[in-house]
Image (cartoon, rainbow, N blue to C red):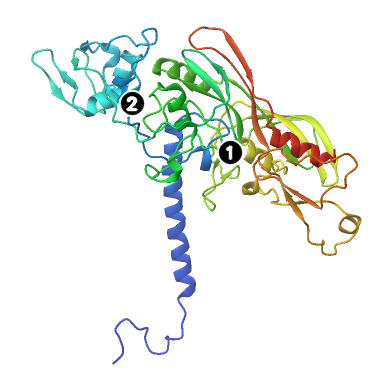
Amino acid sequence: MPSKHMLPKGKRRQSVRAEYRAARTAGQERAEQLEAEQLEEATQTALPHDDSNDVAGLDTDPDLHSDTDPDDNPLPASLSPAPIPSSLTVDATGSGKRLDAYLAHAIPEISRARVQLLISAGQVRVGDGHGAGITVRPSHKLRAGQVISIEGEPRPAPLHATPEDIPLDILHEDEFLAVINKPAGMMVHAGAGTSDDSRNRGTLVNALLHHMQQLSSTSGELRPGIVHRLDKETSGAIVVAKDDLTHRKLSELFSTRRVKKTYLALVHGALAQEAVTVTLPIARDLVRRTRMTTRRPDGRTAISHVRVLERLATPYGPFTLVEVRIETGRTHQIRVHMQSLGHAVVGDTLYGAPRTIPAITPASSSTKRKRPKARPIRMPSAPEGTEMQSGQEAPSSMQLPRNFLHAAHLEFTHPRTGKLLSISAPLPQQLQTFLEQLKGK
């Protein structure tokens, strides 16, 4: 007996494959759009960051916790914030504001994350001044004249990130902040679901916890001290804060574009102009989730100023060494902006750079015959044995196991002393050696 779900007789050869595929594709697109919107919202509420950390810019990450109770490592007296008042009366300007936002503004010495910690721990009560008041949610809307009572200090949960004795190249350090020369291959902080696996080790945060013990908590327990970020494979200068007040002032400098951030990049091809400004907005690619794109109309504003430093005619084709100053700090900003110009950053296979760079031969340049199989030479992380002797024949191909992108310079006014800081990070030896081999030196 035929099933009631079968098509009527005479139509059983009719295919519904096209309708099924269309429905499935529409469903996937809706799901991807929703995921993208949620991810973009998370990005916008996260830290300001430089050309960004993985997926960067944004490794979705769980809270990084430390085993050390903050009371075991108190701030030096000179850095200790003013004591938190035991009570506050809501003025007219606070009427209608969220409780957490009002407290973060009224007590600038502590971060909004700490404020929310106080509220969630039941240490904040709201009342009319007669009695102890009641505990409420962080989103509670205030009324003028209400009294906010605060009990004790915020006590963050212990961090899971453990200090590690990892060498750091410290370019500048004082009692308020430090500027680190981050090597390529080091993540800034751990990613989502990494509290117990190997990705929760070897990060910049692990090294900072060992070398500096005390870091700001404004970014949350996941990334203590981290004010902005760099991609895993991007080297160079990154600033970290040691206390919450310094962190908040640094964040304001970044958000108001008062930090001058300059990068060095080697790109494929010859740029048509000596200088160009790219203003294409950047959003997450809905098809390849690890990439960003300039092709979505709802992207976030991004501004990159590109200036040619050197044009290279090499046995491997033309390349251009550029200086890029970014006004904004979107995820993968420099990488995606250079791709939009048709000049991918060397080594950046995510955005179209070849994994192996073959030497140009007369046969490959004059005909379309299949290029002979190259013998790739991978650049090691250490410079030993990588220098090519004068007059030595260029290898048939080259390969760089990282992006040729380096955060070379940071310039900003110190948020606590008012002095101008101008800090440079030298080009890593690995990139210097690659440039020399590319030129045939």
The C terminus lies in which quarter of the figure? top right
Q: Which residue is rendered at x = 59% and y = 33% of the image?
A: 183
**Of helix, strand and loop, which one carries label 2?**
helix
- Residue 300, placed above or below residue 90: below
Which is more toward the observer, 4 or 126?
126
**Disc sitting over residue 113 in the figure:** 2
Task: Report which quarter residue 307 is drawn in.
Answer: top right
Disc 1 crowd rating (10 Å Cα; few below 14, some 14-19, many 20+) is many
Task: Report which quarter residue 332 is drawn in.
Answer: top right
Q: Which residue is mark 1?
A: 332
Relative to residue 235, is residue 96 drawn left or right?
A: left
Residue most extreme to the left: 131
Task: Report which quarter residue 267 is drawn in.
Answer: top right
The N terminus lies in which quarter of the figure? bottom left
Q: Position of residue 322 (x, y in %)?
A: 74, 32
Q: Which residue is rendered at x = 80% and y = 41% of the image?
A: 438
Relative to residue 154, is residue 50 drawn left or right?
A: right
Q: Position of residue 112 (x, y in %)?
A: 34, 23
Relative to residue 71, is residue 79 drawn left or right?
A: right
Disc 2 crowd rating (10 Å Cα; few below 14, some 14-19, many 20+) is some
Which is more toward the observer, 344 or 39?
344
**Disc sitting over residue 56 in the figure:** none
